[in-house]
Image (cartoon, coloured by chain):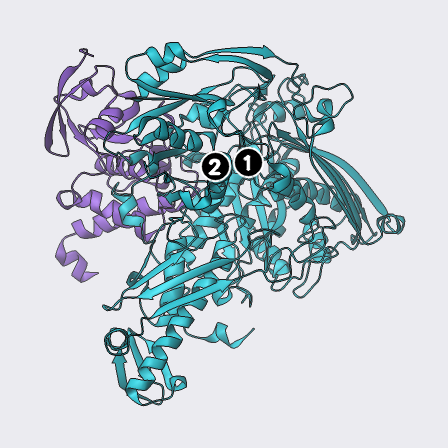
Chain colours: A cyan, B purple
Amino acid sequence: MRDETMREFQVIGRPTVKKDALAKASGRAEYADDIAMPGMLHGKLLRSPHPHARIVRIDASRALALAGVRAVVTGRDFPGVRYGNLPQTRDYLPLALDAVRYIGEEVAAVAAVDEDTAEEALDLIEVEYAPLPAVFDPEAAIAPGAPQLHPHAPGNVSAHTEFQFGDVEAGFAQADHVREDVFETQPVKQGMLEPHACVGLWEPSGKATLWSCKMSPYVVWRQLSMGLDLPPGQVRVVQTYVGGGFSGGKQEAMPMDFCALLLSKRTGRPVKLVHGMDEVLTIGHMRHPMKIWLRTGTTRDGRIVAQHCRLLANGGAYSSIGGFSIFLAGAMLNLPYRVPNIRYEADRIYTNNGFCGALRGHTVVQMCFARESQLERIAADLGLDPLELRHRNAIQPGDTTANGFRVGTFAFDECIDRVAEMSGWREKRGRLPKYRGIGLGCGAHLSGARLMGHSASAAELRIQEDGSIHLTTGSTDVGQGVETVMAMIAAEVLGVDPDDVSCTKVDSASTPVDPGTFGSRVTLFTGKAVERAAEDARTQLAALAAERMGLDPGELVFRGHEILNRNDERQRVSLKEIVRYGAFQRGRLVTGRGVYAAGDEKIDFRSGYGNLSPAYTPTACVAEVEVDPETGHVTVVGLWGADDSGTPLNPLAVKGQVIGATVMSLGHALYENLIRVDGRVMNPSFRDYKMPLATDIPPLERFKHANVLTWEPEGPFGAKEAGQGAGTGVVAAIANAIHDATGIRFHRLPMTPEAILRGLGRVPEAKESAQ
Amino acid sequence: MNDLVPVSLLVNGVRYDAAIRPWRTLLEVLRETLALTGTKRSCGEGQCGACTVLIDGRAVNACLYLAVEAQGKEIQTIEGPAAGDPVLAQIQRSFATKGAIQCGFCTPGMVIAARALLAERAQPSEDEIRAALVGHLCRCTGYVQIIEAIQDAAGALARDAAPVAARVGS
């Protein structure tokens, strides 16, 4: 460990209340749906009732004749430019043009004086469809003769990834034991409580401004510019408070965003659109359902010598970020283990379902469920303790993995030990009563991906004459507490309080361009940029203070809003006095700038080789469950997690992140499933799409999380990822606990009461109807 | 449209008179007519609890409550003056200091639910807190810090209420 860990910090590492907490607790935080503008109209979207159809004709004349309706737009009113996340995946349109490819796809939009009128007008738009054969299952979609969704994607292959490291054949040849299993995962929704909402205003000057709850406003900005065929300079995206995101639609421009702007252009009024929760749960953006075939070879003593994975992802009708999704699942296949020989082949398939993309933990969650369930079987086959099997294969700090990840800090062994100790694993495993069980699941995550496109973050920091600090970045606070942590970093460097630092929300017209908030990148990438911006400002202040105090800048320290002579602390000036001196007497304004760039270490997506992230977080989770054999109900009676998030900058926020991620995965394991029959979502409401409640989590004394502290040199003040890794091992931990309790091994999620009863032989195997 | 009816609503001690369509929910009227947007619109069907307000001290989902039905009753929303309600103010402080707030969208409803709970039971058990929150979804926090915040608020209020002598003696 370096000296920094020993250093006494003024701000870093102290539980710090979020800057916006009281505004949110008193209802003063303004979310997108809270915006009202004079003359504002309300928009609604007409959605396709068909999973696959050609649009023959749209007649909006009756809708336009309805009192209170101001405008109707269809796909023909847009420039017809497709947009998307990656150059090769531009398959989105603002509204459907010639065809619809899933039930719920947006076909037309109305602006009216109020929501009721807009809703009524939707019923008056006549759309003539010519239904086409549809396909919902990825295996059916790649079969010869299957209906084809997109002309550019023969065989419905939306994306394909394959790579190999080491010698997989030789690896399996030296294995004493080989296991093959197939696992299947379900569609899971982001489940944020704030539905997507936006307000669009197209000014007569041609400037198009969108206010919306976006996690990555600059992605939206570029996509709007593409789909509207406008120069980016004419588009402005302003971030509001974000009521939960977890990736998905808040990462991208959605049809509602385009329609708000075009309807505003047509009417000369601001136009607001807000999704109903039924719409949110019907439309795209969800976790990819996957079929994962996994073959793992080990030596007799449990060392993994080779892994081969084939993956088929049901991508739905459009690409979203799906190309990266299936890449990531393979790239993270080996973490947190040493696997010398890896082969990975994955296809993402277009089907006539709502499309899939990123969701907290992205595709790492599915892969960890498969791998950790299989490792449990391997441990049993070899007669090894599951903890010991993990220890024997654990990646160690300083390792370079077969696919080129250069791992820095990585306290995985300690995480395993910690959860074993907290959960009482050694006392409980094999000793619990019938229908009670304990299981382990592990995982890992990135601290931001080094992407081939926009990867770098920047920060700007201005010190005002009263000593207050104005910080701008392009990152968004989506509830995880970015503004607070960034303020803490700047405050630590400059010797002030976090309350002295104000942060602005993203406005594409004034904040630094940034990839956005995803992939657990913000604390590390933006945090590092903020640290450097604050250091830049400190250097400027030190030069001014040195001038003023007749000292060398190297002799100065910053503490308690003052600049002090390190050798004689009686000699000191206040920070604001120096700012004023600089501005008033010298004309030198203190404005710090900092950047963090991924550098040249980008990953090569074709070969799959490279150092994907600056830092990696290992995690371990133990779950204890009780199964009711009469009802099949699973009660999670204990959850203990440990991860190595480096040095937590704000422990209060880190706790919220790891617990939140854990409970989200609990839902994924046991309840959540977007049920679709022939492409129609059967449970588009929170009544029927079951997310965990306060009564579903273990008692607080048996729900604990520990941070194993390391000092990650890549991160700001030793920090790395915290919000996603903790959720990656949980699903398998619960699956393994259920196996321990009942002997039922689940290869398919979620592990519902019905499935438990089937496994116990209490009810007959049902034919799988939903997919 | 001439289907408007007059309503008179007492919200946070302030009397509001408005003309609304009779089928408008209290949530819609609070947010759109009275511009009290602290009460959040999420599921719109009584599942998530984000729109919870107090009506005569009882927590209800404003999305399932017609505005006309709320006449003659005392409505308290998250915008209610915390200065006049030390319990509400303490709950808000505890939510902040215990990290119970992430995105904040469920927070107004959670705070109101906690207010109703503490009115009924000053020192609720952990299970009683969970039961009081069962009509509320939070996707960010995993509930732990929300439960801890309500425990903290109950504890702080008990300390404040304790006789001075007892506090000095402890």
The chain holding disc 1 is A
Q: Nearer the observer, disc 2 or disc 1?
A: 1
Residue displayed at 39% across by 11% down:
A61
Give the residue pinned by disc 1.
A83
Residue A454 can be seen, yes or no: yes
Q: Is residue A172 left or right of residue B160?
A: right
Residue A253 image label: 2
Q: Describe the element under mark 2 as helix, strand or loop.
A: loop
Residue B34: x and y, percent? Answer: 18, 30
Residue displayed at 17% across by 56% down:
B166
In this picture, is A768 found above or below A91? above
Within-10-Å neighbours for mark 2: few <14, some 14–19, many 20+? many
Q: Amino acid at mark 2?
A: Ala
Residue A719 versus residue A603: which sits nearer the camera?
A603
Residue A454 versus residue A359: which sits nearer the camera?
A454
In this picture, is A361 found above or below A719? above
Q: Describe the element under mark 1 as helix, strand or loop.
A: loop
Residue A530: x and y, percent? Answer: 43, 63
Residue A737: x and y, percent? Answer: 62, 39
Within-10-Å neighbours for mark 1: few <14, some 14–19, many 20+? many
Residue B152 can be seen, yes or no: no
